[in-house]
Image: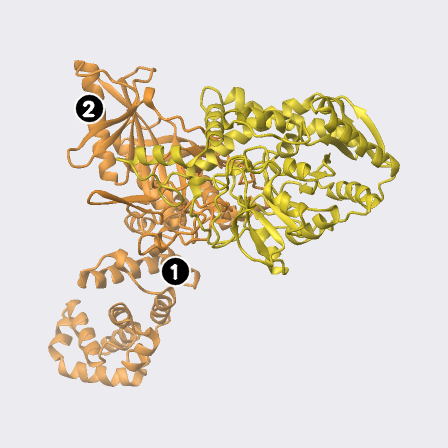
Chain colours: A yellow, B orange
Amino acid sequence: MSEYIVKLAENGNIAVDDTILVKDAQSAAGSRILEGFKPLFSAEAVTRLENAGYVMAGKTQVGEFGLDLVGEFSYYSEKEENLKGAAASLVASGTVKAALGVDMNGATRRAAALSKVDFLKPTYGTVSRYGIISCAASGEQLGVYAKKAEGIKEIMDVIAGHDEKDGTSLKETSYNYNTDEAVSGKKVCVVKELLEKADAKTAARVKEYADKLRALGVVVEEVSLDFFDIANTTWQILMTAETCNNVSRYDGVKFGHRAAEYKNIDELYVNTRTEGFNFLTKAVILYGSDVLSKDRYADCYGKALKVRRVIADRFNALMEQYDAVLTPVCSKEAYTAYDIKDAFKTVFEESVFTSVANLIGTPALVSGGVQLLGKAFSENVLLSLAGSVERVGE
Amino acid sequence: MKYELVIGLETHVELSTESKIFCSCGGHSASKEPNDCVCPACSGMPGMLPVMNKRVVELAVTAGLMLNCDISRYTTFDKKNYYYPDLPCAYQITQLNHPICTNGLVTLKTSEGTRDIRIKQIHMEEDAGKLVHVGKASLVDFNRTSVPLIEIVTQPDFRSAEEVLVYLNKLKSMFRSGGISECEEGAMRCDVNISVRPEGSEEFGVRTEIKNMASFEAIERAIRYESQRHMDAIEFETEELVQETRRFDDVSGKTFAMRNKETEADYRYFPDANLMPIIIDDEWLEKIKAAKPVEIDEKAESYRAAGISEKEIDMLIHNHNVSKLLDDVVAAGCDAKNVAGWILTDCVGILRKNGKLLGDLEITAKDLTAIIKMVDSGEVNRMSGRKILTAVLEEGVEPVAYCKENGLDAKVDTSTIEAIMDRVFAENAQAIADYKNGKEKAKQALFGACMRELKNTADTAVIKEILENKLKTV
């Protein structure tokens, strides 16, 4: 199989997920609806890396708009070909040094966990979203895959910092990332309810990681918290609504796929979108338009916006006591092929581990098959915890 | 039965900014060919993000200040979803929950006195593109896409078409003089909400909305037609009125139903996460207030105080460029009433002779100031001043140089004048005799003869003085 949809350079050292624009290379977010779309500009992160001397190796497979588990539903790959994530696999095999991906509904983090590489979803606003094929603007972030925390730091130092082309980009021009802050004495909690959602092997992996942290002098405690399910439901409401809105521009009028058969503008829209989107995207569009409809807005979308603030308060309160939260990333160690008609529910349930970071814009780091969550701008704590564990293994 | 009209207006005004609302493309007026003012952002390509044009906020706030609104210190954008080929993202960025201005008031002078119209809100939004139909094909032009608009929503406070027109004309001259919008044809579009009720009734009748009219004439005709349709429906039960959206057909002069409430689109409004809330702090608001141009009413008052006539004030405040010219010349040290005379009598006279109107006036404040100052200081006389002005307007000459080149400066020494006067007296014995017999007109004839001899150059006041003195001696 090929991890690349478009191969760009033999000597490339960075893989770029198809949800991220690279100038003049087809950038289609794994979807037929954008077939043939070649952007006029590269994403800001790509431009910064190129300016720093990195070479883009190619556009990697992603599930349509990054909505699936790990990239199994790309229009451009054989069905369910890759259940570990294409970019993550290339990093794992050492084919590329690092990869860029869009963290929107957990697919990038799950791929990293299953491929045993690191992935950082940084704090919202630290990396420019200019040039990512946007779905859920309020919570998606461009993130980095690398073998080790040190590799993530190297890329983040290049791509993070203010970009005037993104109105949500924060003012800071750099963040001084590091992976070697002292970790002894740091406090980490493990969430009982999330461990219970994972199978025995996955739960054991988390416990093992906790032991490695303890060996470094980190205090690890188990806590009971009820808000991860609520955070997940809330994020699914916001995510589906925003995605529904953002993909509505793909209508066959301007670029990308256009149906061959239509008699009028309505048929052009309907036929193009019927052909262009896969079953999962269509399900997301249906849920998203439902939660925004006049009759449902107050109970769904409007309420989700309020709950988002409550969750942020609860999470920040937790972070007063702990430096990080240690959780599983997926419910199991490996995924098997499944029917796309079950995808919405499957992804929804798996996202319980990842959603909170998207919902409230906080950083999440996947390393050694587990996840570390922290408060906003705590990347260095997370990178140092993971980096310390990694250095012990060397 | 007698009926009362109840009308509310939603007026869209295209703002005069150099660039579009969320990207750096030139504004609508910059476009010459279809799709020559378009970038990946305003054509809806993926990956591009809206970045707020601050000037739009400032113009919207200025409009709000002019209409006596409360200015929101926290304002946000929302997305309005609908599919149409001229809307590249399939949503319009607008303001629903936190509009930039609320609770305004504008006072109108109508033939029946003054009327207060309450402004519900002003919000910022982006315009859509347009479709061009060629044969069976439809082409899309995105030049107008994302051009900034403000929408001014009134309460249902209008009671006649006349009031609506007075209001729209007032907005137009306000926004022009304030540099908010040129309000050219098509840059000001109205949705009219209209209902009719028996006079004295407190309850509102069934309301219809007539969408998207760009000319004041169409708005007036549409109101007249639609209100008559409502009255007929109530009085003669010609039809059952339903709440619906209608369109005005310019050719037939009638309105037609577009869609009714039951089938009305659900726009699924929600906050735009790509645009952070805008905070208008004290410092920024004060800056906008300080930059706000003097309003029409204040300006009229200041002209009145300077002794300018009502008729002249009317001409001035409805012509932004002209009132600015006057203000600039006054600022350069000339008397307002005098300048108004130069502009509205001399300039207008010269323009008329050339088949032009006041709106066609093209003269810099510097040139007009130079001419007026030459006359005021006695350097040239009034008649020569007008001659110079004519040359400036018709040939675009530089006034001071023109004056010198044509020997129009009034610096003729008194002995020359006296010598010429002697000759005129000698040649006009009859006129002197007439003057002695009490014919005042004879003095005028002598004066005229002197001026002819002097080729109209000398200072008239000096000539008059010498003439008076000389007449005493005869």
> What residue is drawn where x is 22% and y is 37%?
B218
Comparing A90 with B379, the one in front is: A90
Q: Which quarter shows the C terminus of chain B?
A: bottom left
Task: Give the image location of residue A363, x and y in percent.
Answer: 69, 38
B230 left or right of A260 in image = left
Q: Secondary structure at mark 2?
A: helix
Comparing A294 with A187, the one in front is: A187
User: Measured along the vertical axis of the image, is residue B350 above or below residue A58?
Assistant: below
> What residue is drawn where x is 73% and y is 42%?
A379
Task: Give the image location of residue B157, x and y in percent.
Answer: 35, 27
Residue B335, disc: 1
Chain ID, mark 2: B
Query: Marks 2/1: CA distance?
Result: 52 Å
Task: Give the image location of residue A288, x and y in percent.
Answer: 49, 27
User: Measured along the vertical axis of the image, is residue A145 above or below residue B334?
Assistant: above
On the question of residue B384 being in view, the answer is yes
On the question of residue A321 being in view, the answer is no
> What residue is drawn where x is 60% and y is 36%?
A83
The answer to whether dots 2 and 1 both sit on one chain is yes
Mark with earlier residue (2, 1): 2
B41 left or right of B312 in image = right
Under mark 2, the amino acid is Gln
Q: Secondary structure at mark 1?
A: loop
Identity of the residue furthest to the front in this view:
A1
Under mark 1, the amino acid is Asp
> What residue is drawn where x is 23% and y is 34%?
B220
Tell me the residue that label 2 is attached to: B228
Comparing B57 with A358, the one in front is: A358
